Amino acid sequence: MSSSSQMTEDTLPNQSGRVFFVTGGATHLTENFLLNIAALSPEHIFFTDRDTALADGLVRKIDKIYPNTKITLLVCDMLNPSLDEVEAAATKFCQLSNRLDVLVLNDGPLDVPPPTDWQNRVGYDIRLQDANFNQWLLIKLLLPTLLVTAKNNHVRIVASASLDDRIWSKDTDINSRIDFSPLTIGALDANGQPTSTPGTEVLSAPNKLTSVLYMRALSKLYPSITSISVHPGRLKQVKLHADGVAYRTCVEQESMEWAYLDEGAVPYTQLWAALIADKEDLVNGAYYPYEEQPEAVMLGAKGDGKVKEFLDYVEWYLKRWDVESRI
Protein backbone atom coordinates (compact mmCIF):
# COMPACT_ATOMS: atom_id res chain seq x y z
CA MET A 1 0.00 0.00 0.00
CA SER A 2 1.29 3.43 -0.87
CA SER A 3 2.06 5.74 2.02
CA SER A 4 0.08 8.92 2.58
CA SER A 5 2.96 11.03 1.29
CA GLN A 6 2.74 9.20 -2.04
CA MET A 7 -0.98 9.76 -2.45
CA THR A 8 -1.63 13.01 -4.27
CA GLU A 9 -3.97 14.24 -6.96
CA ASP A 10 -1.27 13.36 -9.49
CA THR A 11 -0.66 9.81 -8.25
CA LEU A 12 -4.19 8.64 -7.42
CA PRO A 13 -6.08 7.08 -10.34
CA ASN A 14 -8.56 9.22 -12.26
CA GLN A 15 -12.17 8.44 -11.33
CA SER A 16 -13.87 9.80 -14.43
CA GLY A 17 -17.33 8.34 -14.91
CA ARG A 18 -17.49 6.76 -11.46
CA VAL A 19 -20.15 7.46 -8.82
CA PHE A 20 -19.45 7.43 -5.07
CA PHE A 21 -21.78 7.20 -2.07
CA VAL A 22 -20.17 7.96 1.31
CA THR A 23 -21.74 7.93 4.78
CA GLY A 24 -20.34 9.46 7.94
CA GLY A 25 -21.00 13.19 7.80
CA ALA A 26 -18.81 16.12 6.80
CA THR A 27 -16.13 15.81 9.48
CA HIS A 28 -12.73 14.19 9.93
CA LEU A 29 -12.37 10.90 8.08
CA THR A 30 -15.30 11.38 5.71
CA GLU A 31 -14.43 14.98 4.88
CA ASN A 32 -10.84 14.06 4.06
CA PHE A 33 -11.94 11.15 1.90
CA LEU A 34 -14.39 13.35 0.00
CA LEU A 35 -11.78 16.04 -0.62
CA ASN A 36 -9.38 13.46 -2.02
CA ILE A 37 -11.81 11.83 -4.43
CA ALA A 38 -13.27 15.20 -5.50
CA ALA A 39 -9.89 15.98 -7.05
CA LEU A 40 -10.05 12.89 -9.28
CA SER A 41 -12.88 13.96 -11.63
CA PRO A 42 -15.60 11.52 -10.52
CA GLU A 43 -18.97 11.58 -12.25
CA HIS A 44 -20.84 12.32 -9.02
CA ILE A 45 -20.27 12.18 -5.25
CA PHE A 46 -23.13 11.63 -2.83
CA PHE A 47 -22.68 11.83 0.94
CA THR A 48 -24.89 11.78 4.00
CA ASP A 49 -25.00 14.07 7.01
CA ARG A 50 -27.59 15.14 9.55
CA ASP A 51 -25.86 18.50 10.13
CA THR A 52 -26.88 20.50 7.06
CA ALA A 53 -24.91 23.61 8.04
CA LEU A 54 -21.67 21.66 8.32
CA ALA A 55 -22.37 19.63 5.20
CA ASP A 56 -23.31 22.69 3.14
CA GLY A 57 -19.99 24.22 4.13
CA LEU A 58 -18.15 21.18 2.76
CA VAL A 59 -20.15 21.31 -0.47
CA ARG A 60 -19.21 24.97 -0.94
CA LYS A 61 -15.57 24.15 -0.22
CA ILE A 62 -15.47 21.40 -2.83
CA ASP A 63 -17.39 23.54 -5.34
CA LYS A 64 -14.76 26.25 -4.95
CA ILE A 65 -11.71 23.99 -5.21
CA TYR A 66 -13.10 21.53 -7.76
CA PRO A 67 -15.87 23.35 -9.65
CA ASN A 68 -16.28 20.54 -12.18
CA THR A 69 -16.99 17.89 -9.53
CA LYS A 70 -20.66 17.27 -8.86
CA ILE A 71 -21.39 16.64 -5.18
CA THR A 72 -24.80 16.13 -3.57
CA LEU A 73 -25.74 16.11 0.10
CA LEU A 74 -28.35 13.55 1.11
CA VAL A 75 -29.71 14.72 4.45
CA CYS A 76 -29.90 11.64 6.63
CA ASP A 77 -29.62 10.97 10.35
CA MET A 78 -28.11 7.50 10.59
CA LEU A 79 -29.13 7.40 14.26
CA ASN A 80 -32.83 7.85 13.52
CA PRO A 81 -34.57 4.68 14.71
CA SER A 82 -37.54 5.07 12.33
CA LEU A 83 -35.41 4.24 9.24
CA ASP A 84 -37.41 6.82 7.26
CA GLU A 85 -34.45 9.09 6.58
CA VAL A 86 -32.33 6.24 5.24
CA GLU A 87 -35.11 5.24 2.87
CA ALA A 88 -35.58 8.85 1.73
CA ALA A 89 -31.85 9.30 1.11
CA ALA A 90 -31.62 6.08 -0.89
CA THR A 91 -34.71 6.98 -2.90
CA LYS A 92 -33.30 10.39 -3.79
CA PHE A 93 -30.01 8.82 -4.82
CA CYS A 94 -31.76 6.35 -7.14
CA GLN A 95 -33.67 9.23 -8.72
CA LEU A 96 -30.43 11.08 -9.46
CA SER A 97 -28.12 8.24 -10.50
CA ASN A 98 -28.43 4.92 -12.31
CA ARG A 99 -24.99 3.68 -11.29
CA LEU A 100 -22.92 3.30 -8.13
CA ASP A 101 -19.28 2.26 -8.26
CA VAL A 102 -18.07 2.74 -4.68
CA LEU A 103 -20.07 2.69 -1.43
CA VAL A 104 -18.05 3.76 1.61
CA LEU A 105 -19.62 3.14 5.02
CA ASN A 106 -18.08 5.17 7.81
CA ASP A 107 -19.48 4.27 11.22
CA GLY A 108 -20.97 6.69 13.67
CA PRO A 109 -20.41 7.13 17.42
CA LEU A 110 -17.34 5.45 18.88
CA ASP A 111 -16.62 5.62 22.60
CA VAL A 112 -19.71 7.68 23.35
CA PRO A 113 -21.34 6.99 26.70
CA PRO A 114 -25.00 6.05 26.25
CA PRO A 115 -27.60 8.63 27.34
CA THR A 116 -29.50 7.90 30.53
CA ASP A 117 -32.50 6.69 28.54
CA TRP A 118 -30.33 4.89 26.00
CA GLN A 119 -32.42 1.71 25.91
CA ASN A 120 -35.80 2.96 27.02
CA ARG A 121 -36.26 5.01 23.85
CA VAL A 122 -35.75 2.30 21.28
CA GLY A 123 -34.89 -0.94 23.07
CA TYR A 124 -31.21 -1.21 22.18
CA ASP A 125 -27.95 0.71 22.24
CA ILE A 126 -27.98 3.65 19.80
CA ARG A 127 -24.72 2.42 18.27
CA LEU A 128 -26.68 -0.40 16.68
CA GLN A 129 -28.82 2.10 14.80
CA ASP A 130 -25.95 3.58 12.78
CA ALA A 131 -23.47 0.73 12.61
CA ASN A 132 -26.03 -1.96 11.89
CA PHE A 133 -29.69 -1.36 11.17
CA ASN A 134 -29.49 1.78 9.06
CA GLN A 135 -26.37 0.73 7.16
CA TRP A 136 -27.85 -2.67 6.38
CA LEU A 137 -31.06 -1.06 5.11
CA LEU A 138 -29.05 1.41 3.05
CA ILE A 139 -27.14 -1.45 1.42
CA LYS A 140 -30.42 -3.23 0.68
CA LEU A 141 -31.89 -0.17 -1.02
CA LEU A 142 -28.75 0.58 -3.05
CA LEU A 143 -28.11 -3.04 -3.98
CA PRO A 144 -30.05 -3.05 -7.29
CA THR A 145 -27.95 -0.13 -8.55
CA LEU A 146 -24.74 -1.72 -7.28
CA LEU A 147 -25.50 -5.00 -9.04
CA VAL A 148 -26.36 -3.34 -12.35
CA THR A 149 -23.14 -1.33 -12.22
CA ALA A 150 -21.14 -4.45 -11.33
CA LYS A 151 -22.08 -6.14 -14.62
CA ASN A 152 -19.43 -4.13 -16.46
CA ASN A 153 -17.42 -2.45 -13.69
CA HIS A 154 -15.46 -3.23 -10.53
CA VAL A 155 -17.90 -2.23 -7.79
CA ARG A 156 -16.69 -2.00 -4.18
CA ILE A 157 -18.22 -1.62 -0.75
CA VAL A 158 -15.69 -0.46 1.85
CA ALA A 159 -16.74 -0.44 5.50
CA SER A 160 -14.79 1.28 8.26
CA ALA A 161 -14.07 -1.07 11.17
CA SER A 162 -12.71 1.55 13.53
CA LEU A 163 -12.06 -0.39 16.71
CA ASP A 164 -11.29 -3.83 15.36
CA ASP A 165 -7.57 -3.71 16.02
CA ARG A 166 -8.12 -3.18 19.72
CA ILE A 167 -10.06 -6.42 20.11
CA TRP A 168 -9.15 -8.47 17.08
CA SER A 169 -6.19 -10.67 16.28
CA LYS A 170 -5.62 -13.46 13.80
CA ASP A 171 -5.48 -15.94 16.68
CA THR A 172 -8.68 -14.80 18.37
CA ASP A 173 -11.98 -16.62 17.97
CA ILE A 174 -14.50 -14.03 16.82
CA ASN A 175 -17.29 -15.96 18.54
CA SER A 176 -15.86 -14.94 21.91
CA ARG A 177 -15.53 -11.32 20.82
CA ILE A 178 -19.04 -10.52 19.66
CA ASP A 179 -21.90 -10.69 22.09
CA PHE A 180 -25.16 -9.01 21.16
CA SER A 181 -26.83 -9.46 24.54
CA PRO A 182 -25.51 -6.23 26.15
CA LEU A 183 -26.82 -4.21 23.19
CA THR A 184 -30.48 -5.08 23.59
CA ILE A 185 -32.92 -4.06 26.23
CA GLY A 186 -32.54 -5.90 29.52
CA ALA A 187 -34.26 -5.81 32.88
CA LEU A 188 -36.13 -2.59 33.66
CA ASP A 189 -36.95 -1.03 36.99
CA ALA A 190 -40.36 0.25 38.08
CA ASN A 191 -39.83 3.46 36.11
CA GLY A 192 -39.03 1.65 32.89
CA GLN A 193 -35.32 2.35 33.06
CA PRO A 194 -32.63 -0.32 32.59
CA THR A 195 -31.37 -1.72 35.88
CA SER A 196 -27.80 -1.60 34.62
CA THR A 197 -25.94 0.14 31.81
CA PRO A 198 -23.10 -1.70 30.06
CA GLY A 199 -19.81 0.13 29.85
CA THR A 200 -18.84 2.08 26.77
CA GLU A 201 -16.18 -0.41 25.68
CA VAL A 202 -18.63 -3.30 26.03
CA LEU A 203 -21.00 -1.48 23.70
CA SER A 204 -18.48 -0.19 21.17
CA ALA A 205 -16.46 -3.33 20.59
CA PRO A 206 -19.11 -5.61 19.06
CA ASN A 207 -20.55 -2.81 16.96
CA LYS A 208 -17.24 -2.14 15.26
CA LEU A 209 -16.65 -5.81 14.58
CA THR A 210 -20.02 -6.09 12.88
CA SER A 211 -18.57 -4.29 9.86
CA VAL A 212 -16.46 -7.41 9.32
CA LEU A 213 -19.59 -9.56 9.47
CA TYR A 214 -21.48 -7.33 7.02
CA MET A 215 -18.80 -7.50 4.40
CA ARG A 216 -18.33 -11.25 4.82
CA ALA A 217 -22.06 -11.80 4.36
CA LEU A 218 -22.21 -9.60 1.26
CA SER A 219 -19.22 -11.31 -0.32
CA LYS A 220 -21.04 -14.63 -0.10
CA LEU A 221 -24.42 -13.36 -1.26
CA TYR A 222 -23.13 -11.12 -4.05
CA PRO A 223 -19.65 -12.15 -5.21
CA SER A 224 -19.77 -9.76 -8.19
CA ILE A 225 -19.33 -6.91 -5.68
CA THR A 226 -16.07 -6.59 -3.74
CA SER A 227 -17.09 -6.09 -0.10
CA ILE A 228 -14.30 -5.49 2.43
CA SER A 229 -13.76 -3.84 5.81
CA VAL A 230 -10.72 -1.74 6.68
CA HIS A 231 -9.14 -0.09 9.69
CA PRO A 232 -8.70 3.65 8.99
CA GLY A 233 -5.70 4.12 11.30
CA ARG A 234 -5.31 6.27 14.37
CA LEU A 235 -7.75 9.12 14.17
CA LYS A 236 -8.16 11.88 16.73
CA GLN A 237 -11.78 12.93 16.87
CA VAL A 238 -14.01 15.26 18.82
CA LYS A 239 -17.10 13.46 20.04
CA LEU A 240 -20.13 14.68 21.95
CA HIS A 241 -21.69 13.23 25.03
CA ALA A 242 -25.46 12.99 25.08
CA ASP A 243 -25.46 16.20 27.15
CA GLY A 244 -23.43 18.02 24.49
CA VAL A 245 -20.12 18.07 26.37
CA ALA A 246 -17.21 17.53 23.99
CA TYR A 247 -14.49 15.07 24.77
CA ARG A 248 -11.73 13.46 22.78
CA THR A 249 -11.29 9.86 21.90
CA CYS A 250 -8.90 8.11 19.60
CA VAL A 251 -8.92 4.98 17.57
CA GLU A 252 -5.95 2.92 18.64
CA GLN A 253 -3.70 0.98 16.33
CA GLU A 254 -0.83 -0.37 18.35
CA SER A 255 1.47 -1.24 15.43
CA MET A 256 1.85 2.37 14.25
CA GLU A 257 4.88 4.26 15.54
CA TRP A 258 3.57 7.77 14.91
CA ALA A 259 0.90 9.51 16.94
CA TYR A 260 -2.46 10.62 15.56
CA LEU A 261 -3.78 11.57 12.15
CA ASP A 262 -4.27 15.30 11.82
CA GLU A 263 -7.66 16.61 10.75
CA GLY A 264 -6.37 17.02 7.21
CA ALA A 265 -4.54 13.71 7.03
CA VAL A 266 -5.01 11.50 4.00
CA PRO A 267 -7.26 8.52 4.86
CA TYR A 268 -5.08 6.32 2.73
CA THR A 269 -6.29 2.97 3.99
CA GLN A 270 -9.72 3.76 2.62
CA LEU A 271 -8.31 5.31 -0.55
CA TRP A 272 -6.21 2.21 -1.12
CA ALA A 273 -9.23 -0.06 -0.69
CA ALA A 274 -11.65 2.08 -2.69
CA LEU A 275 -9.45 3.32 -5.53
CA ILE A 276 -5.99 1.83 -5.77
CA ALA A 277 -5.95 -1.90 -5.06
CA ASP A 278 -6.68 -4.04 -8.11
CA LYS A 279 -9.65 -6.38 -7.90
CA GLU A 280 -7.43 -9.45 -8.06
CA ASP A 281 -5.39 -8.13 -5.12
CA LEU A 282 -8.41 -7.90 -2.81
CA VAL A 283 -9.91 -10.88 -1.00
CA ASN A 284 -13.66 -10.50 -1.09
CA GLY A 285 -15.17 -10.48 2.40
CA ALA A 286 -11.85 -9.88 4.14
CA TYR A 287 -10.84 -7.41 6.83
CA TYR A 288 -7.69 -5.32 6.23
CA PRO A 289 -5.86 -3.91 9.28
CA TYR A 290 -3.93 -0.66 9.14
CA GLU A 291 -0.54 -1.67 7.78
CA GLU A 292 1.85 -0.52 5.07
CA GLN A 293 1.27 -3.85 3.32
CA PRO A 294 -2.13 -4.98 4.59
CA GLU A 295 -2.85 -8.68 4.59
CA ALA A 296 -6.37 -9.99 4.42
CA VAL A 297 -7.79 -11.37 7.66
CA MET A 298 -10.58 -13.88 7.12
CA LEU A 299 -13.17 -15.33 9.43
CA GLY A 300 -12.85 -19.01 10.19
CA ALA A 301 -15.71 -21.49 10.18
CA LYS A 302 -16.81 -20.41 13.65
CA GLY A 303 -16.73 -16.77 12.62
CA ASP A 304 -18.85 -17.51 9.57
CA GLY A 305 -21.39 -18.99 11.95
CA LYS A 306 -21.45 -15.64 13.72
CA VAL A 307 -22.37 -13.98 10.42
CA LYS A 308 -25.67 -15.86 10.32
CA GLU A 309 -26.39 -15.04 13.95
CA PHE A 310 -25.74 -11.38 13.24
CA LEU A 311 -27.96 -11.28 10.14
CA ASP A 312 -30.77 -12.98 12.04
CA TYR A 313 -30.37 -10.39 14.77
CA VAL A 314 -30.61 -7.45 12.34
CA GLU A 315 -33.55 -8.98 10.53
CA TRP A 316 -35.37 -9.40 13.81
CA TYR A 317 -35.16 -5.66 14.30
CA LEU A 318 -35.99 -4.62 10.76
CA LYS A 319 -39.10 -6.78 10.77
CA ARG A 320 -40.38 -4.57 13.57
CA TRP A 321 -40.51 -1.82 10.93
CA ASP A 322 -42.05 -4.04 8.25
CA VAL A 323 -38.81 -4.06 6.27
CA GLU A 324 -37.98 -7.06 4.10
CA SER A 325 -34.39 -7.27 5.26
CA ARG A 326 -32.90 -10.29 3.47
CA ILE A 327 -30.81 -8.80 0.69
Image: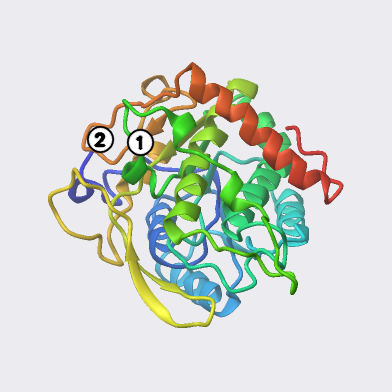
Residue under label 1: 276
| Residue found 32% across the figure and 46% down from its top | 166
Amino acid at pointer 1: Ile
Tell me if I can see residue 153 in this picture. no
Residue 263 pos. (x, y %): 30, 67
Residue under label 2: 1
Q: Residues within 10 Å of mark 1 (few under 14, many from 20)?
A: some
Tell me if I can see residue 188 in this picture. yes
Tell which circle, 1 or 2, labels the residue nearer the N-terminal end. Answer: 2
Residue 92 pos. (x, y %): 74, 56
Q: Are marks 1 and 2 in contact (CB under 8 Å)?
A: yes
Residue 304 pos. (x, y %): 54, 22
Nearer the observer, 68 or 190: 190
Q: Tag count in the figure?
A: 2
| Residue found 42% across the figure and 56% down from its top | 201
Please indicate whether residue 319 sits to the left or right of residue 311 in the image.
Answer: right
Q: Residues within 10 Å of mark 2 (few under 14, many from 20)?
A: some
